[in-house]
Amino acid sequence: MASPLARWIFLFLQISLLLGLLEAGARSVIGDGGDGVGIQMIPRRQPRDDGGFSTHAEKEGGPMGMDDPKTMKHHMHDHDSNTDDPSVHIFFNLEDLMVGKRMLLYFPHKTDPSRTPRLLPREEAESIPFTSTKLSSILSFFSFPDDSRQARAMANTLHQCELEPIKGELKFCATSMEEMLDRTHQIFATESRALATTYISMKKTAKALQNYTVLETPKQIEARRMIGCHTMPYPYAVYYCHIQLQSETRLFQVALGGAEVDRIDALAACHMDTSRWDRDHVSFKVLHIEPGSAPVCHFFPVDNLVWVPRQ
Ligand SMILES: *[C@@H]1O[C@H](CO)[C@@H](O)[C@H](O)[C@H]1NC(C)=O
């Protein structure tokens, strides 16, 4: 058995490596999820206003898109009938996982890494309250008016984080990498490793919504369990993590190529049983299926993390 010190050093290296990789990724590629699309993958109905906290390739505004009228417009859609939103193009059918399959998919750029919410060190994150009951003091801490879009997005993030998990699911929100590592470690009762979608090469001019072709036979990642962590709209990085305890989820690595993208190594999950999901979940509209009638697969945006037990 490794000594506690050795384990901490290992954990530290793991965090450094992960952060280093994410940072290297941010420098060398232009891609980025970061627009709150992650919340679509939570098996509930999701309001889709991200309060402008994160980047859309087409957004121009400041760090939080605060004073950009275009962003405002973008976010004033009716959320429940929003299947025309390009960012819903992450869902697909299990049968689509084969070489040569073409799909219209949304993989947004990272135009400016400084615009994505910053991951705080644990001590800093824990010094800021993270609960609906303290919303007004959180808002004044970040200088957002109570009736702002940001305030609504933050209230919604806190609400999502505080909801009881649906049956057969375990969930938590993490406000730091350290917390995420601790929680995943606890749940798996073993070390975990993180997987993510990576952009191998993408032109600066590439459109977020493109036709992609599956380049190679998708590789299934054997994992007894997996915890999916999605970024949530907030002034700093908040991950909504969840794990299905009863229903089967399959994890795949899928090489995708497009007209303006040489290759994306995309991470995808297929939820084999969706019978307990909200009927209004956007995936059912996109795939034209009913809850429980077929598996729902989705790609993970580049800023999401999927944790699996270390073998
Ligand atoms: C994707 O392919 C379809 C069918 O070939 C085409 O009609 C559509 O315009 C393409 N979309 C984009 C965004 O390239």
Image (tube, rainbow, N blue to C red):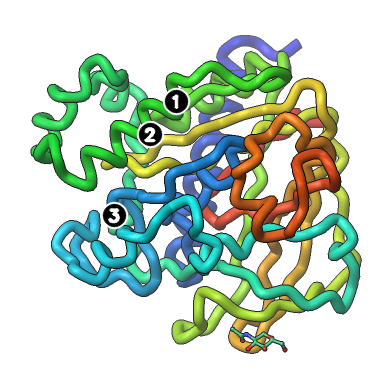
Q: Amino acid under label 1? A: Cys
* Mark 3 / mark 1, whichever is N-terminal: 3
The residue indicated by pointer 3 is 52
Observer-nearest of 46 and 124: 46
Which residue appears at 29% of the width and 54% of the height?
Answer: 52
Mark 1 element type = helix
Q: Is mark 3 within 8 Å of ligand 1?
A: no
Q: Are marks 3 and 1 in contact (CB under 8 Å)?
A: no
Horizontal relation, residue 116 to residue 257: left or right? left
Horizontal relation, residue 179 to residue 226: left or right? left
Q: Is residue 86 above or below residue 123?
A: below
Q: Are marks 1 and 2 in contact (CB under 8 Å)?
A: yes
Q: Amino acid under label 2? A: Thr
Horizontal relation, residue 195 to residue 81: left or right? right
Few, some or many C-alpha atoms within 10 Å of disc 1 (few <14, some 14-19, many ≥20)?
Answer: many
The residue indicated by pointer 2 is 157
* Mark 2 / mark 3, whichever is N-terminal: 3
Q: CA distance from mark 3 to mark 1?
A: 19 Å
Q: CA distance from mark 2 to mark 3?
A: 13 Å
Which residue appears at 59% of the width and 76% of the height?
Answer: 201
Q: CA distance from mark 1 to mark 2?
A: 6 Å
Mark 3 element type = loop
Few, some or many C-alpha atoms within 10 Å of disc 2 (few <14, some 14-19, many ≥20)?
Answer: many
Horizontal relation, residue 91 to residue 60: left or right? right
Q: Amino acid under label 3? A: Gly
The residue indicated by pointer 1 is 161
Q: Where ligand 1 lies, by quadrant?
A: bottom right
Mark 2 element type = helix
